[in-house]
């Protein structure tokens, strides 16, 4: 799953609109198999942050910080969350850390 999300993230910034839209739809389909309801509730902002980290990453990270996770986080959830956490840790601004 992580390899699939990584490949999809690479084409999310494709200049061809249909490729970009197809990547977003594929990520949404991955999100549809998520078993953790807390991640399911955040799926919209996660997809936005994966497709445009400059604009939505801090919002997604803040939402994750404010969420109390009561359920286990499954592999599809982690495959969507880890790239955002990685991006947040490698950003130059201190607000995301």
Image: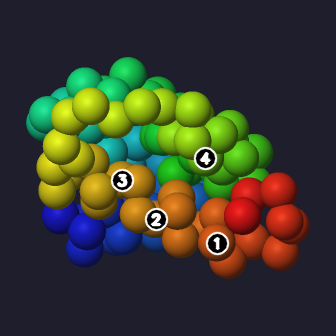
What residue does disc 3 label? 80
The answer to whether the residues at label 1 and label 3 have Cβ atoms under 8 Å apart is: no
Q: Using the rendered image of the protein, determine whether residue 10 is visible from the camera's viewpoint.
A: yes
Mark 2 or mark 4, earlier in chain: 4
- Please give the residue where the numbered disc 4 appears in the rendered image: 61
Q: Which mark is residue 58?
A: none
Q: Upstream in the sequence, badge 1 or badge 4?
A: 4
Relative side of 92 to 30, left or right: right
Of the numbered discs 1 and 3, the one sitting upstream in the chain is 3
Q: Is mark 1 on a helix, strand or loop?
A: helix
Q: Which residue bears the numbered disc 2? A: 83
Q: What residue is drawn where x is 83% and y is 75%?
A: 92
Tell me whether circle 1 and circle 2 mark residues in contact (CB < 8 Å).
Answer: no
Q: Position of residue 67 (x, y in %)?
A: 48, 31
In whole angstroms, how far apart are the C-alphas of marks 1 and 3?
15 Å
Of circles 3 and 4, the one toward us is: 4
The residue tagged with tag 3: helix, strand or loop? helix
Task: Tell me how far mark 3 sits from mark 4, CA to CA.
Answer: 12 Å
- Nearer to us of marks 1 and 3 is 1
Left or right of 5 in this view: 52: right
Percent position of residue 30, x then y = 22, 43
* Mark 4 secondary-structure assignment: helix
User: Residue 8, position in %: x, y?
Assistant: 36, 61
SS at badge 2: helix
Cβ atoms under marks 2 and 3 closer than 8 Å = yes
Spatial CA span between label 2 and label 3: 6 Å
Q: Which residue carries the number 1 mark?
A: 89
Report the quarter where the N terminus lies: bottom left
């Amino acid at each position: 799953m992580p390899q699939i999300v990584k490949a999809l993230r690479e084409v999310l910034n494709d200049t061809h609109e249909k490729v970009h839209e197809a990547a977003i739809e594929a990520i949404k389909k991955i999100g549809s198999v998520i078993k953790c309801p807390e991640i399911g509730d955040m799926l919209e902002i996660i997809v936005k942050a994966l497709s445009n980290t400059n604009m939505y990453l801090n919002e997604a990270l803040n939402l994750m910080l404010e969420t109390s996770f009561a359920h286990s986080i499954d592999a599809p959830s982690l495959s969507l969350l880890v790239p955002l956490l990685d991006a947040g840790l490698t950003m130059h601004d201190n607000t995301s850390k």
